[in-house]
């Protein structure tokens, strides 16, 4: 059992998200999907388990573990510290599997760059599934811990898996999602992409405004936006760049609604979607158009690295006893 001593700025249970957009339910899930996958792989959670963990945002929680566990923290460079029941402190390294003893307190501090990290627990957090996911939908108030961010006093259980020797490995920096403050997001053009709109959106650097959450990040700066009151509502997906009538673009994140009436002339390619979870106010964003072939190649390269790391760590936990290979490096 994990007891929440201090909840942090916004700590929510998240997993791989939902697949029922046809019902009007947002996908949700961890905003930095690469961090989620690597954190789970480090503690031996199989990819197909879609194991739930904690997504921490800007300032992390303090957690009291009432039982031994194996955890890992991946994502933005949050500081962390472990203090045992005897008061003795121990280092807590991100991007590694870290054994936690019963009575330990794990304090996750802030991050100087990026916005989010994912704390995985071996076995995965055990909360009820809603629409096939344990993730929290904050706007609709379901999933996760009663549909809300964690509060002091909350208690979270996790599913048990056989105890293992932690993998003596860390994740290669090349696999980690860049955390800014400068982001070049590769985008593809949609049928809404008129020449004037594309020139305006790809010809300047935008600054992420303070209006940024799991639904979307509003970008500072104004472009001349088309306005058509008769425009029909069309499907949205995370990564779309909306241009509302007042001209400040919005990049949609995992909790965005499934439909919208604003023009969406660009969409961030799948390989760069994890970067959206690391956008924080003040970061600078440049939108770079790429072809469909370039987007596919980027996704393949991204997936290849993640899958090699997942495979190497699965091999370790399967009992092979050798050092993980390739993109998850052994000590």
Image: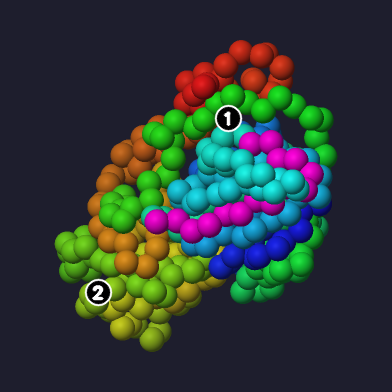
Q: Is residue 16 visible?
A: no
Residue 298 percent coordinates (x, y): 36, 38
**Spatial distance from mark 2 to mark 1, Cα to Cα?**
40 Å
- Is 259 in front, or is 172? 172
Verify CB contact (< 8 Å) between mark 2 and mark 1.
no
Q: Is residue 180 visible?
A: yes
Q: Earlier in the sequence, mark 2 or mark 1?
A: 2
Residue at numbered disc 1 = 310
Residue at 40%, 84% in the rendered image: 230
The answer to which quarter of the image holds residue 247 is: bottom left
Q: Is residue 102 magenta?
A: yes
Residue 79 percent coordinates (x, y): 50, 50
Mark 1 lies on a secondary structure that is helix
- Is 135 in front, or is 192? 135
> What colour scheme was applied to this rendering of the protein?
rainbow
285 left or right of 128 in image: left
Q: Relative to residue 121, is residue 62 depicted above or below?
A: below
Residue at numbered disc 2 = 221
Per the rendered image, the range of residues in magenta is 98-112
Q: Relative to residue 100, is residue 151 depicted above or below?
A: below
Mark 2 lies on a secondary structure that is loop
Looking at the rendered structure, which numbered label has been put on residue 188?
Answer: none
Residue at 63%, 70% in the rendered image: 138
- Is 243 in front, or is 162? 162
Residue at 40%, 79% in the rendered image: 231
Residue 185 percent coordinates (x, y): 32, 52
């Amino acid at each position: 059992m994990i007891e929440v001593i201090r909840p942090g700025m916004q700590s929510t249970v998240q997993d791989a998200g939902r697949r029922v957009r046809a019902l009007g339910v947002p996908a949700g899930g961890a905003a930095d999907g690469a961090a989620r996958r690597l954190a789970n792989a480090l503690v031996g959670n199989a990819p197909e388990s879609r194991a739930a963990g904690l997504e921490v945002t800007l300032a992390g929680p303090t957690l009291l573990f009432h039982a031994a566990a194996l955890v890992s923290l991946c994502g933005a460079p949050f500081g962390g510290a472990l203090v045992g029941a005897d008061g003795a402190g121990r280092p807590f390294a991100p991007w590694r599997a870290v054994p936690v003893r019963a009575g330990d307190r794990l304090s996750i501090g802030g991050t100087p760059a990026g916005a989010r990290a994912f704390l995985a627990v071996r076995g995965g957090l055990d909360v009820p599934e809603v629409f096939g996911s344990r993730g929290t939908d904050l706007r609709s108030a379901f999933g996760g811990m009663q549909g809300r961010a964690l509060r002091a006093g909350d208690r979270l259980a996790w599913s048990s898996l056989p105890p293992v020797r932690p993998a003596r490995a860390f994740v290669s920096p090349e696999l980690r999602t860049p955390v800014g403050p400068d982001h070049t997001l590769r985008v593809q053009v949609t049928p809404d992409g008129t020449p004037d709109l594309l020139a305006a959106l790809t010809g300047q650097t935008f600054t992420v405004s303070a209006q940024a959450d799991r639904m979307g990040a509003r970008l500072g700066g104004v472009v001349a936006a088309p306005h058509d009151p008769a425009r029909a509502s069309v499907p949205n997906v995370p990564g779309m760049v909306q241009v509302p009538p007042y001209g400040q673009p919005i990049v949609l994140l995992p909790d965005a609604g499934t439909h919208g009436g604003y023009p969406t002339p660009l969409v961030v390619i799948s390989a760069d979607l994890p970067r959206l979870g690391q956008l924080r106010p003040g970061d600078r964003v440049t939108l770079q158009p790429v072809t469909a072939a370039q987007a596919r190649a980027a996704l393949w390269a991204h997936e290849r690295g993640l899958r090699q790391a997942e495979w190497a760590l699965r091999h370790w936990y399967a009992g092979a006893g050798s050092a993980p290979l390739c993109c998850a490096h052994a000590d």
